[in-house]
Image: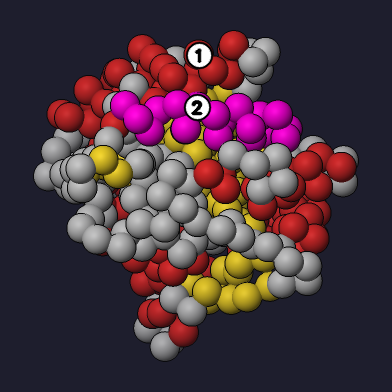
Amino acid sequence: MSFPRHRARRLRRSEGLRGLVRETRLSAAGLVYPLFVCPGTKVKKEVGSMPGVYQQSVDQIVEECREMEGLGLPAVILFGLPETKDPRGRSSLEDAGVVQRAIEAIRKAKLKLLVITDVCLCEYTDHGHCGVIEDGEVCNDATLPILAEQAVSHARAGADIVAPSDMMDGRVGAIRQSLDGNGFLDVAILSYAAKYCSGFYGPFREAADSTPQFGDRRSYQMDPANAREAEKEVAQDIEEGADMVMVKPALPYLDIIHRVREKFDVPVAAYNVSGEYAMVKAAAARGWLDEKRVVLEVLTGIQRAGASIIMTYHAKDAARWLKQG
Ligand code: PBG
């Protein structure tokens, strides 16, 4: 297979040829757009560290969803900025909560869009941790029933898929049991199975107002140095009933996405997180990177590694660029 009989450049000579032999075809059909729901009406407040990303009231969220549908995007993932916070994140369970009202409004607008909800406590607790605190520590087992109740409340409002991102052990099983017990047999679980303790979540914590008020998330999120452990986390979540699994963040963890794709037979999602978005936006704003080119390259890379679903703040831009061809 050597030169001169084989010339790799033969198949790179035109866009037609390159298109014919292309192994990865990025499409808007696999992109999920994250939205941040806040109280009020006609609120649309840009997140400083995430240009083009907003905290929005329910009415604005519905408009965004309409636009997404027009762009051929299949799904939205909702995060809530509640009116009130307390140590147990009770505002995450209310029928009139921000996320619940947003789901209902999207349903009422008769959009085909799939609604995914982030299930976690950090946006709703006054201490900003993803679980309840007992004796100064994030308590695993006491958090499970609250997460399960939150998932059921999202399902009742009309969510198609719930996505637990808290990293408590056993939450997928607890959520599946509660969903089934309440008759939501067909609401799917997309588990943030391999979620690393990452510096790349920085801008999100501004967007979702969910910065831990003490300590950090190292006692529940994964150590960035571990890959085999990710396989164990994924296996456990599938065993507990996860329909799909997610690796998060995406770019520093492409090897993990690849491993999970090779080893498991459920759909694999990856979260192209806030810090990854902010890096590209900051460099593009200075003219240091070509935004369109880099975004499409990043998303292609994540898909090539093995993710068929990508959660990304670039979703709307990418869908527009893909449409233009
Ligand atoms: C936690 C949650 C986080 C993100 C999604 N869900 C933040 C965290 O764990 O601190 C991060 C998403 C991003 O950075 O874009 N509920």
Q: Residue 152 carries which label?
A: none
| Callout 1: SS | helix
Amino acid identity at mark 1: Gln
Considering depth in this image, is 298 or 12 the residue closer to the camera?
298
| Residue 177 tag number | 1
Q: Is residue 156 magenta?
A: yes
Please tell me which residue is depicted at 36% across the width and 45% down the height of the picture.
130
Which residue is the extreme one toward the front?
A: 135
Place residue 211 in its image quadrant.
Answer: bottom left
Residue at left offset 50%, top offset 56%: 85
Q: Rounded to the nearest whole Å, what is the CA distance between mark 2 and mark 1?
A: 8 Å
Q: Nearer the viewer, residue 20 or 63?
A: 63
Residue beneath the point at 81% across and 47% down = 105
State the image quarter where residue 260 is shown: top left
Amino acid, disc 2:
Ala
Give the side of residue 115 with respect to residue 219, left or right: right
View extreme (bottom): residue: 286
Q: Label 2: few (<14), some or many (≥20) within 10 Å?
A: many
Instruction: Give the total of numbered labels.
Output: 2
Horizontal side, residue 290 vs residue 127: left or right: right
- Label annotation for residue 148: 2
Q: What stretch is highlighted in magenta?
A: 141-160
Asked if one can make out residue 121 in the rendered structure from this viewpoint, the answer is: no
User: Residue 287: horizontal and vertical position, in percent?
Assistant: 43, 86
Vertical arrangement, residue 68 with respect to residue 277, above or below: above
